[in-house]
Image (cartoon, helix red, strand yellow):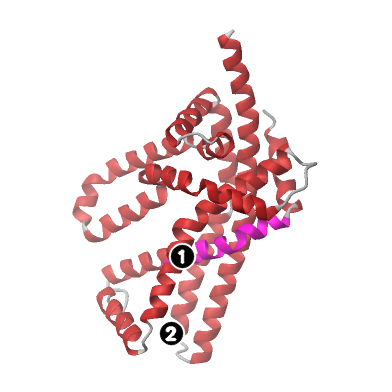
Amino acid sequence: MNYGRIIKDSWSLTVENPRIKWLVLIPSFFGVLIFTVEIAWQLYLYADKYDLMDITATEGYGILLGYVTDHGLWGVSIMAALLIAVFMFIVPLWVQGTLILCVRHKFISPDVKFLLRPKMLKGFEYFFPFFKFESATSIFSLLSIAFFAASLHRYFESLFEFVWPIMVGYAFVAMVVNLFLSFAPFYIVTQNISIGEAIKKSAALVFTHLGETVTIMLLMFLVNFRILLNVIVVLGVPIAVLAAFTLFSTKTAIFLSVIFGLLLVGLAAYLTAIMAVFMTAVWALSFEVLKAEHDQIIAVDEE
């Protein structure tokens, strides 16, 4: 398996097809924004736990609720909650199906005219299969495990000291499970099979080509600089906003800090969109190569 060729072709597809990148940009913006708020809230709760803030979390809830009530912002708050729900649970699944379709079209049928909007419509067909897949595998989400561990440590520290080895072991199991689920979304899109069958086929493909799959995952880990960028955003935005409130409590300073934070989030979203297209391209091309080899092995065994 020529890893260098796969990465080169995937990067060429990413930079030569800006329409695919822009498809992912807006969902990436909301995704980064929501993720930043989640991390900032976790940091705020820890600051409250160790008495590093003048306002406790309970008082913060009261201030926020009072502000919404006093200014009649219940309608806006409900709309904002619905918008967040859409970009957390609906849009990512639709974009995932659409993105796989776009990448496969560019790889498999490069001479056929590419039309983005039909791919977007086709991508909706995979929303419910992906929803079922995510629901079935959500207990193996490393981010969810990390947030659960943080909450357990924050509220039940003595219990956390007892169960943390178990949680570390479970996180390792989750990593292994995610490894064997790597190609399930591509089976769902390419073969229109059930979730169980897609998981079964993905596990068989990974097991047959375990070394190649692990290598691809490690390469993606090395080139995926979104982690570093998210750290910069997560630390930079809360610090900037906090400094504006505590050191420069003027409307101008607050406004500038918000603008600065949104610019950071926008930059993170742009780079995240690039990496999303690139990583999907790498996995899609790897899937085609490994599946062809796997099918050939199966055909030989059946003869």
Q: Is 85 on the left or on the right of 255, as rendered?
A: left
Q: Which residue is mark 1?
A: 34
Residue type at numbered disc 1? Ile
Q: Residues within 10 Å of mark 1 (few under 14, many from 20)?
A: some
Q: Secondary structure at mark 1?
A: helix
How many other residues sit within 10 Å of disc 2, few (<14), some (14-19) or many (≥20)? Answer: some
Query: Residue 298: x, y in percent?
Result: 57, 16
| Main SS, magenta residues | helix
x 52%, y 29%: residue: 206
User: 45 left or right of 273?
Assistant: left
Q: What label does residue 245 carry, if any? A: 2
Which of the image's four quarters has the N terminus? top right
Tell me where the magenta segment starts and ends, as one range. Answer: 18-37
Three-letter amino acid code of the residue under disc 2: Phe
Residue 123: percent from left, percent from top: 58, 49
Q: Residue at x 61, y 66 (%)?
A: 267
| N-terminal label among 2 and 1 | 1
| Depicted 162 relative to depicted 87: above or below | above
Q: Can residue 166 be seen?
A: yes
Q: Position of residue 265 (x, y in %)?
A: 56, 68
Give above or below for 103 relative to 23: above
**Residue sitting at x 27%, y 80%:** 62
Q: Residue furthest left?
A: 158
Helix, strand or loop status at disc 2 = helix
Residue 32 lies within the magenta run:
yes
Q: Is residue 232 left or right of residue 106?
A: left
